[in-house]
Amino acid sequence: MSVKRVFIIHGWEGTPDSNWFPWLKAELEKKRFEVAIPQMPNADFPKMSEWILHMRKNIGKPDENTYLIGHSLGAAAILRYLESLPAGEKIGGAILVAGVAKSIGIEELENFFAKSFDYEKIKNTAKKIIAVNSDNDPYVPLAHGETLRDKLGAKLIIVPKGEHLNAGNGLFEFPLVYSEILKMAGGK
């Protein structure tokens, strides 16, 4: 049986030990997942090309036992990474938490949104995609999750009053994402 690998991609100004990432890593490792939370380069002034290169280096050869979980800009980075995969390469799935589907007007992040996502290509690179958004996120309106649902055929899970789904609103554990990745990966 192949090892199921999970990569958690933090967002803008993020670190591997922020938010619910360490908790999720520990819980998944108990289920024998291989989990990595790479520190993305230049997290305060992110460059899309650097992030994609860094993800490629960390992930290596993706396959159907590869799962990606991204928070905020990390979700957009996952979409850009999937877009960049050669034809025929596919991952098992992705969970996009507070995922950004287009510019949210923050200058430091604009290089990720200079062009629209190639949603058709992205759909063909992931067996399953789940968007998890809050109905009162101060940075990423719920419409972004709805766009991901509509354009990618993603399952949309709405967390009531979850704000940005991060430590800023007390989220240091995220059982919802844990149970969804287990279902997605067949890890019970």
Image (cartoon, helix red, strand yellow):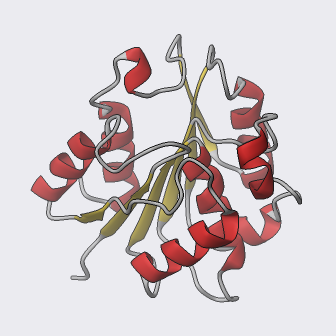
Left or right relative to 47: residue 134: left
Q: Is residue 8 above or below residue 62?
A: above
**Residue found at the far right of this picture:** 115
Counting from the top left corner in percent of width and height, residue 158 is at 57, 24
Counting from the top left corner in percent of width and height, residue 76 is at 65, 53
Left or right relative to 76: residue 181: left
Left or right relative to 117: residue 188: left
Counting from the top left corner in percent of width and height, residue 60 is at 43, 85
The residue closer to the viewer here, 181 or 44, is 44
Q: Quadrant of residue 32?
A: bottom left
From this viewpoint, is residue 73 visible?
Answer: yes
Who's the residue at 45% across and 44% down the image? 14
Counting from the top left corner in percent of width and height, residue 29 is at 16, 58
In which quadrant is the N terminus drawn? bottom left
Q: Quadrant of residue 120?
A: bottom right
Who's the residue at 35% across and 63% down the image? 6
